[in-house]
Amino acid sequence: MKKIKTNLEGLFIIKSKIFYDNRGFLREAFKKKIIKKNLIFAIVSKSKKNVLRGLHLQKKNQQDKCILVLKGKIIDVAVDMRKKSKTYGKHYKIILSDKNGKSLFIPKGFAHGFLGLEKENIVLYGCSNYRNKESEVTIDWNDKNLKIKWPVSKPILSKKDRKGMKFSKF
């Protein structure tokens, strides 16, 4: 397992080895010596192709997250929402899949979203804090100020994600 830094402070890729045999495969999800945070809560989501979830964050009870794809392939995006950060408003985009062995660690203060690229996409989130619905904020997935190039113009969105706030209002 290897930690790879990104251009956004605190955000990093975890590259795991995948061990295949005739039964299937084995892959380590995360290790304390790499993440150094207590992940106390896990969520699994299943999404069809072209489902876009996000961009989500919690203002209070913020969460560090480790994102891992169990099945399928996604474009994963993290946006730095830390107002005092040098990279405030910048985003990082990566393809995560069950085959490439990559996970993304997203620190507190980032908005997160992803787009499903395959027929079935199963994503595991390891979180450092519990979900707090009253603290949740959704940022507009296609806000022009964020300059995120999604490969789809009309994704499948939840009601909540269709009503995301503009980045400038955050």
Image: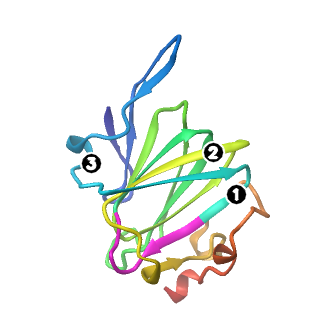
x, y percent for residue 37 = 24, 54
> In terms of secondary structure, where does tag 2 sit?
strand
Amino acid bearing label 1: Val
Above or below residue 152? Residue 54 is: below
- Nearest to the observer: residue 96 or residue 48: 48
Residue sticking out furthest to the top: 22
What segment is highlighted magenta in the picture? 54-63
Residue under label 1: 51
Residue under label 3: 35
> In terms of secondary structure, where does tag 1 sit?
loop
Visible residue check, residue 148: no
Residue depicted at x 79% and y 64%: 154
Residue depicted at x 62% and y 76%: 140
- Nearest to the observer: residue 168 or residue 128: 128
x, y percent for residue 132 = 41, 76
Q: In terms of sequence position, does the residue under pointer 3 or pointer 1 come before the other?
A: 3
x, y percent for residue 141 = 63, 70
Residue depicted at x 75% and y 62%: 155
Is residue 92 highlighted in magenta? no
Residue under label 2: 121
